[in-house]
Image: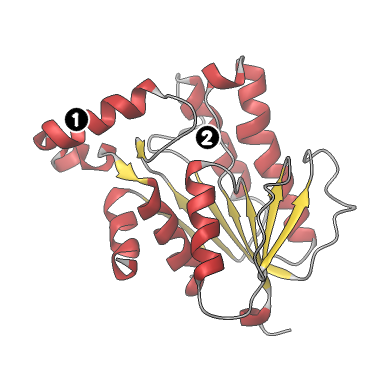
């Protein structure tokens, strides 16, 4: 099956970035199917949408058409998860499990939402887990990997996240704080991250690429 006819898979399709990514893929021209891995049915109906309900513990029995690209937008915070172990399960174990499973199904391109400052040696637990995932994802041997490292994400969430609220205020009132080396910490709209992710999948490049604020905006620009 030619790559352009293969389906696309989205994990984390109900979150802020994941939902925006799913909408863009469903609205895109072409007949390619979009597979959404979800914990519970969204009740959504679309000719291109294939929804698969899973707890991510047993992915092997899931039946899907062949897919070439995986968008992984799974993520939470330590506070929302309830503990560091629960956070690690969602932000490290599940994405890596999905990456391995998808690779066994023939996926060639993995697109991940991470975070600016991700580093497996970071003293910050959140950034350390993100960095560990990036490090271990790079060892799987995917032909193409795009890792997006936004700072504070702007958009309407179901839950209130103080850091994102503060980031939004800073973006609007104190833009001069995010100049020079600090520019990568500039808050960014989730819709721009989603648009950049979809753009990266249209023309995947061999190897691993990381995208910070400016790269995200450059990739998203044609969609505006």
The tally of labels here is 2
Q: Is residue 148 above or below residue 175?
A: below
Expressed as whole percent of the image width and height from the top left, the position of residue 42 reads 67, 47
| Crowd class of label 1 (few under 14; some 14 to 19; many from 20; radius 10 Å) | some
Residue at horizontal 48 percent and vertical 42 percent from the top: 16
Q: From where the camera sits, is residue 206 visible?
A: no
Q: How is the image coloured?
A: secondary structure
Q: Left of 71 or right of it: where is 106?
A: right
Say which of 211 and 75 sits in front.
75
Q: Is label 1 in a helix, a strand or a loop?
A: helix
Q: Which residue appears at 63% of the width and 26% of the height?
A: 88
Looking at the rendered image, the disc whose residue lies closer to the viewer, 2 or 1, is 1
Secondary structure at badge 2 equals helix
Specify the farthest residue to the right: 61
127 lies above or below 14: above
* Disc 2 target residue: 130
Height in image: 107 above or below 99?
below
Give the residue furthest to the left. Answer: 176
How far across and how far down the image is residue 211, in percent? 38, 53
Mark 1 lies on residue: 170
Is 32 in front, or is 215?
32
Q: Quadrant of the C terminus?
A: bottom left
**Residue at 35% of width from left, 29% of height from top?**
164
Q: Position of residue 173 (x, y in %)?
A: 12, 32
């Amino acid at each position: 099956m030619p790559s352009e006819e293969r389906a696309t898979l989205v994990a984390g399709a109900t979150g802020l970035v994941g939902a925006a990514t799913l909408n863009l893929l469903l609205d895109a021209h072409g007949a390619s199917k979009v597979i959404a891995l979800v914990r519970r049915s969204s009740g959504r109906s679309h000719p291109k949408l294939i929804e698969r309900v899973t707890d991510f513990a047993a992915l092997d029995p899931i039946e899907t058409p062949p897919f070439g690209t995986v968008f992984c937008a799974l993520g939470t915070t330590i506070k929302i998860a309830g503990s560091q172990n629960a956070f690690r399960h969602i932000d490290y174990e599940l994405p890596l499990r999905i990456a391995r499973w998808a690779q066994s199904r023939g996926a060639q391109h993995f697109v991940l939402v991470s975070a600016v400052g991700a580093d497996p040696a970071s003293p910050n637990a959140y950034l350390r887990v993100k960095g560990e995932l990036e490090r271990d994802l790079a060892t799987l041997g995917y032909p193409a990997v795009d890792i997006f490292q936004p700072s504070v994400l702007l958009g309407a969430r179901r839950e209130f996240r103080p850091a994102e609220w503060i980031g939004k205020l800073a973006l609007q009132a104190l833009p001069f704080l995010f100049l020079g080396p600090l520019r990568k910490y500039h808050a960014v709209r989730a819709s721009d991250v989603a648009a950049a992710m979809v753009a990266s999948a249209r023309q995947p490049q061999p190897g691993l690429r990381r995208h910070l604020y400016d790269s995200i905006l450059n990739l998203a620009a044609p969609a505006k």
